[in-house]
Image (cartoon, rainbow, N blue to C red):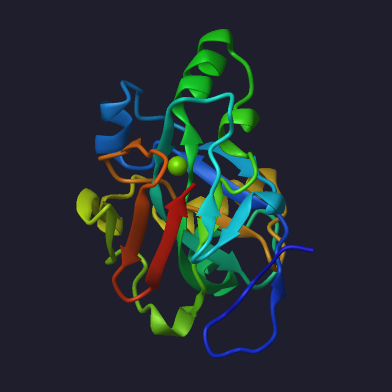
């Protein structure tokens, strides 16, 4: 069983699936030369992709271009299907800082061939994740600053205000396809500034008012 922790709580929470959205910030879509999508581009990471704060990332040997993507993570606390956007935030239990580690070279090849992305996105330790804070501590998930540093150098510096689809809309849209169950996590996309990580790097991801996540690269 893979689990996460909530700040101030002893008991661990079992994680189901991790639903992720691509191209949810216009600047980031542009930097990779992708069109801004009409419908949410969704994919899923399994719970086995989780890596706890303080852990060590091992980049799979079949890639030589692993990218960092800092993202706001949303923990679902109440199960729902086809959730109305107006009701969506009532399904949220908490927020955390996540990285959507991506094997960009592998993904580019899969995209060219029209193949699914899993081996580029859902590999072991591709989802480093901080402790969650209860949703009551985050009055507005669309007013959060995100900052990712590699070896103390700022690489990504953005705000959740720039999401193309805000958290409530993402929950609503994703739950149209997949029942969102208590213990599922939503990754909400990354701002611009993605780039490669290398052996020996230290990554620090901070979302103001939510938390901090630090991992090293083996
Ligand atoms: Mg991403």
Question: Residue at (51%, 10%) from the top-left corner?
Answer: 112
How many numbered discs, if any? 0
Residue 126 occupies which quadrant of the picture? Answer: top right
Question: Residue at (60%, 89%) from the top-left corner?
Answer: 9
Q: Nearer the viewer, residue 191 or 109?
A: 109
Which residue appears farthest toward the right when viewing the image?
1
The x and y percentages for residue 111 are 52, 17
**Is 143 situated above or below 203?**
below
The x and y percentages for residue 191 are 30, 45
**Is 61 situated above or below 14?**
above
Q: Quadrant of ligand 1?
A: top left
Q: Taking 1 as reference, is 54 left or right?
A: left
The x and y percentages for residue 33 are 31, 21
Residue 203 occupies which quadrant of the picture? Answer: bottom left
Q: Nearer the viewer, residue 199 or 9?
A: 199
Residue 20 occupies which quadrant of the picture? Answer: top right
**Is 134 situated above or below 27?**
below
Question: Residue at (63%, 42%) from the top-left corner?
Answer: 44
Question: Residue at (62%, 39%) from the top-left corner?
Answer: 122
Locate the N terminus and report the quarter of the image it occupies: bottom right
Q: Taking 70 as reference, is 176 left or right?
A: right
Q: Nearer the viewer, residue 120 or 44?
A: 120
The x and y percentages for residue 36 are 35, 29
Which residue appears farthest toward the top when viewing the image?
113
Q: Taking 133 as reference, is 149 left or right?
A: left
């Amino acid at each position: 069983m893979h689990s996460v922790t909530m700040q101030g709580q002893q008991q661990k929470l079992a994680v189901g699936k991790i639903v992720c959205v691509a191209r949810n910030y216009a600047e980031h879509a542009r930097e990779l030369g992708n069109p801004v999508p009409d419908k949410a581009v969704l994919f899923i990471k399994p719970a086995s992709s989780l890596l706890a704060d303080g852990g060590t990332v091992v980049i799979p040997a079949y890639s030589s271009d692993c990218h960092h993507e800092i993202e706001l993570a949303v923990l679902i606390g109440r199960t729902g299907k086809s959730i109305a956007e107006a009701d969506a935030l009532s399904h949220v239990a908490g927020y955390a800082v996540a990285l959507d580690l991506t094997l960009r070279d592998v993904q580019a090849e899969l995209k060219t061939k029209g193949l699914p992305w899993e081996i580029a996105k859902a590999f072991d330790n591709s989802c480093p994740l901080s402790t969650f804070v209860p949703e009551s501590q985050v009055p507005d998930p669309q007013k959060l600053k995100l900052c990712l540093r590699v070896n103390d150098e700022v690489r990504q510096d953005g705000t959740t205000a720039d999401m193309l689809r805000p958290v409530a809309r993402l929950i609503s849209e994703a739950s149209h396809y997949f029942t969102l169950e208590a213990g599922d996590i939503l990754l909400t996309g990354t701002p611009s500034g993605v780039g490669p990580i290398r052996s020996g790097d230290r990554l620090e991801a901070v979302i103001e008012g939510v938390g901090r996540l630090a991992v090293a690269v083996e």
